[in-house]
Image: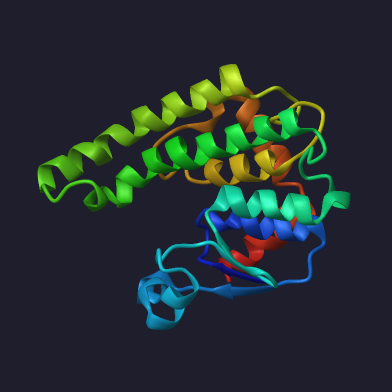
Amino acid sequence: MILYYAPFTCAVAAHIALEEAGADYEARRIDFSKTEQRSEDYLKVNPKGRVPALVTDRGIITELPAILAYIAQTFPAAKLAPVDDFFEFARVQAFNNYLCATVHVAHAHKLRGSRWTDDPAAIESLKAKVPETMSECFALIENEMFTGPWVMGEDYSICDIYLFTLCQWLNFDDVDINIFPKVADHNRRMLQNPSVQKVLAAHAT
């Protein structure tokens, strides 16, 4: 498999999941500062011009929740999701889709406001709203969605990997993670994970 990623994007989650699964893969960096995501070669991989993208022996998968689910299902021995329990797996998917469709979008308003409007004043308004919307998202996770000690309960899963990845954006979004004690403790524990440490080091170089 080949993972296309850009440093410290949501592709961090796919990268960690591949490490946790013990997968045989190659990681290829896409340099956003050089707009490589819009290059002719990369658009052949992912016409959306975004990361991550995962090349498999059956084709290319895009969209992070789908990639995480694929990794969990392809490497069941890693126990990254309850793949044999359809209801519990649906709960995993529900959490990860909330992160993708709501939390990530709220964060994107700070840097990607031009996706929604061309009005400079409106773009600034979107930026100003980010601390509030991200805080609301994480309050919901903290109070209603986080079971503990891991997101889904006793078992570590791809939800933990995805949540950790988005937590790394909170400081940039002017949100103090420590106002969410369960999420903050989860983040500290994830930082001790060898796979997490390996991936973060790779993204930092």
Question: Which residue occupies the foreground of this view, 44 or 197?
Answer: 44
Q: Quadrant of the N terminus?
A: bottom right
| 98 relative to 74, above or below | above
Specify the farthest residue to the right.
77
* Residue 109 image point, x, y percent: 31, 43
* Residue 132 image point, x, y percent: 35, 27
Q: Quadrant of the C terminus?
A: bottom right
| 2 relative to 95, above or below | below
| 36 relative to 88, above or below | below
Along the horizontal axis of the image, is 34 left or right of 13?
left
* Residue 102 image point, x, y percent: 43, 35
Question: Which residue occupies the foreground of this view, 42 or 170?
Answer: 42
Q: Who's the residue at 84% across and 50% down the image?
A: 76
Along the horizontal axis of the image, is 171 left or right of 113?
right
Q: Dividing the picture into quarters, in which one does residue 82 lie?
A: top right
Question: Which residue occupies the foreground of this view, 37 or 197?
Answer: 37
Specify the farthest residue to the top.
143
Along the horizontal axis of the image, is 166 left or right of 78?
left
* Residue 191 image point, x, y percent: 70, 46
- Colour basis: rainbow
Along the horizontal axis of the image, is 168 left or right of 77?
left
Q: Who's the residue at 39% across and 37% down the image?
A: 174
Q: Is residue 173 visible?
A: no
Q: How many marks?
A: 0
Q: Who's the residue at 31% across and 51% down the image?
A: 111
Q: Who's the residue at 62% across and 31% down the image?
A: 184
Q: Is residue 101 visible?
A: yes
